Image: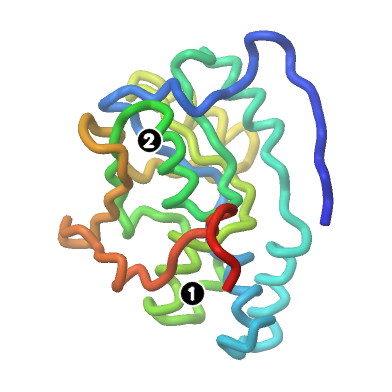
Amino acid sequence: TITAMGQVAPGRALQRDFARAGDDIWVSGSLGGAALALRHLRDEINLKANVLARAMARLLMPEPRIALGMRLANIARTNIAAIDISDGLIADLGHVCERSGLGAEIHWPQIPCHAALLSVGPAMRLPCALAGGDDYDLCFTAPPSARATIISIGEDMALALTRIGTMKSGEAEVVVLDENGLPLSDAQIGASSFDHFAEPM
């Protein structure tokens, strides 16, 4: 295990409670590679050597997005809500929803899946990208007026920043829409995100 500690200047922290209805939802990098490697280690899937190497690199050597967080804080802290994706996209975006008192609608075809996931079918790809953890990329919200600035930041950093959905008024939950705009069920997603407070299995 590791413990990471740091500090931030007063009033400069990115928080979970600044999302507003109509805000865009973004993620950095790609998702699901670490979760796929873990499934291989648990003998739930047998990956080819080249695919496993890419997935294991994601699991064992995650890249903290500190530089991105600092760039986002420079836009305007009170216009950005952010969280790192450690417990799974649905769970961590759900924390932003809870703290901001909003719902979220994201689109499965827009989720940037890790390259290793291209070698597996939807039954494995969906839970790894949507509910898998240990990616440590950022999920953040920002008003549509910030799109050009965010795209520019991504280009400047050579880092993929992908707009995946919208914050909505209503119940604090995350709805995932398929390619036809229909909600995916829990059964289709196929896994639950990590819960620190769940009873041990």
**Residue 177 placement, left or right of 124:** left
Point out the tag, 1 or 2, that comes first from the N-terminus: 2
Q: Tell me which residue sits at (61%, 90%) in the image.
A: 46
Kind of residue at badge 1: Leu
Residue 130, placed above or below residue 121: above
Q: Residue furthest top?
A: 10
Q: CA distance from mark 1 to mark 2?
A: 29 Å
Q: 90 and 178: which one is in front?
A: 90
Residue at horizontal 41%, vertical 21%? 146
Q: Position of residue 12 (x, y in %)?
A: 64, 14
Q: Quadrant of the N terminus?
A: bottom right
Relative horizontal placement of residue 90, taking residue 116 as reference (left or right): left
- Residue in the foreground of this view, choosing between 36 and 152: 36
Residue most extreme to the front: 199
In the picture, residue 189 is in which quadrant?
Answer: bottom left
Q: Are marks 1 and 2 in contact (CB under 8 Å)?
A: no
Which residue lies under the disc numbered 1?
118
Residue 69 placement (x, y as % from top left): 63, 29
Image colouring: rainbow
Circle 2: residue type: Cys
| Residue at screen point 57% across, 86% down | 44
Residue at point 22%, 29% (across, down) = 169
Q: Up-down: is 178 above or below 15?
A: below
Please name the residue that numbered disc 2 is placed on. 97
The total number of labels drawn is 2
Figure check: 143 above or below 41 = above
Image spot of residue 192 (x, y percent): 44, 64
